[in-house]
Image: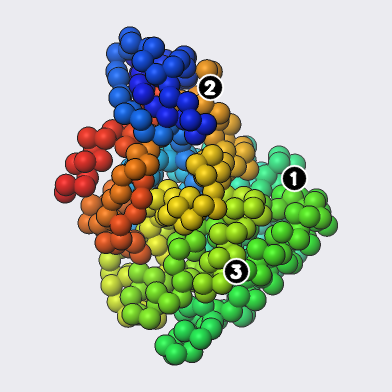
Amino acid sequence: MSLIIKNALLVDGQRIDLLIEEEKIAQIAPAGSITKGSQVIDAKGSLLIPGLVDLHTHLREPGREDAETVDTGSRAAVRGGFTAISAMANTLPVADTAGVVEQIFRLGEATGLCDVFPIGAVTVGLEGKKLSELGAMNQSAAKVRIFSDDGKCVYDPLIMRRALEYVKSFDGLISQHAQEPRLTEGAQMNEGAVSSELGLAGWPAIAEEAIIARDILLAEHVDSRLHIAHLTTAGGVELVRWAKARGVKVTAEVTPHHLLLTDESVRGYDAVFKVNPPLRTEVDVMALRAGLADGTIDIVATDHAPHPSEDKDCEWQAAAFGMLGLETALSVVVQTMIETGLLDWAGLVQRMSTNPAKIAGYTDHGQVIAVGSVANLALIDTQARWTVDRNKMASKSKNTPFNKMELPAVVTHTIYRGRLVLADSEVREGAAK
């Protein structure tokens, strides 16, 4: 079966037709040149980009299928233009063995909407005391290369050093949730003027920055790869910039919500804005945008964290940390980075597709749109705008902080390994529900 995309616009301004056969791009020609194919998409001038890649996705399965499943998370992913997502390890049971990561990998294969790459736990049970089966997970069918205790910090420096040393043998990567636990006991939001006014326990920036600094030095000492998850502070950006100047093998990510929202959002005590790490100040937001623009921060990652309504529709202190991210990520980055002139579309593609695929070693993703490349693609109507409605989302949960917000750019089609997994008719149907 062949698929033709007609009248598509590339980021370099070319207008093309594109033919897909057997999962790969078989032909690229000027718009109007390709006429034969069993399935045709008229892009109508929409932007054609490589499928997005997320290195930080909470799918909850196994164990918390009331919040999300691999199936519903994959459906949310393709709605957002993602063709590869990375499932975090804080499941029940924890993904700290070859058996659990293989289960998640097989669930992704069975769903068949996008690639689901499991991330393995660094320590057994996320307890920070003993290294998990890093080698066995890497040698499993899931071929795990990224390990993280996300949701918890690998706080013991000796354990962190051993993990960094271990993964060197297979060019693995440790993704650190930078949170000094003793400095954040009982913390509810960013420590600052707003937390003082609201009477909520503060979460100081130094709790994040202290771990980032320590781990940069550890990574430099053992010459291993370190990834900083969900960077949120201006000081953290400077630490990563300093480390890169020294040649340390460090990469970093920022979430869409930390590029847009600040701790001022907490004033209404709406727990949808409760997230780990917390929303910071306007100064931090501007530093994160600048860091993403100049390449200090390598990628955008969603930290998609679904929760059932009972875990969010309650008083602030009792609520769970986390926000949805997959379906809104592209639009939020367009608003914060493209509409502000900090990035162009080529820069967005690099930070949301090319760079994450390269960091993770997802060789079939983030490829240049060229003959022979695997057809993992997304079509974007860059002129359209849409209003977020939490009741019309593909995710099983509804905890989006962007509910009722109008955002730019609509993903109209997602193509995974040459198959159309999201069509514009489904987008319209979702908007009408």
Return the residue nearer the eye: 303 or 232: 232
Q: Residues within 10 Å of mark 2 (few under 14, many from 20)?
A: some
Q: Is residue 250 above or below residue 191?
A: above
| Element marked by disc 1 | helix
Return the residue nearer the eye: 379 or 144: 379
Residue at 26% of width from left, 35% of height from top?
424
Which quadrant of the rendered structure holds the N terminus? top left
* First-in-chain label (2 vs 1): 1
Question: Mark 3 or mark 1, which is nearer to you?
Answer: 3
- Taking 142 as reference, is 17 left or right? left
Do tag 2 and tag 3 residues touch (Cβ < 8 Å)?
no
* CA separation in Å, label 2 and label 1: 32 Å
Return the residue nearer the eye: 3 or 107: 3
Residue 63 in view, yes or no: no
Q: Position of residue 324 (x, y in %)?
A: 38, 58
Residue corresponding to mark 3: 233
Q: Residues within 10 Å of mark 1 (few under 14, many from 20)?
A: some
Type of amino acid under label 2:
Ala
Residue corresponding to mark 2: 370
| Element marked by disc 3 | loop
Residue at 69% of width from left, 65% of height from top?
238
Type of amino acid under label 1:
Lys
**Residue 113 location, quadrant:** top left
Question: Mark 2 or mark 1, which is nearer to you?
Answer: 2
Q: Position of residue 228 (x, y in %)?
A: 63, 58
**Residue 239 location, quadrant:** bottom right
Q: Position of residue 71 (x, y in %)?
A: 34, 43
Disc sitting over residue 399 in the figure: none
Residue corresponding to mark 1: 168
Q: Is residue 51 above or below residue 399?
A: above
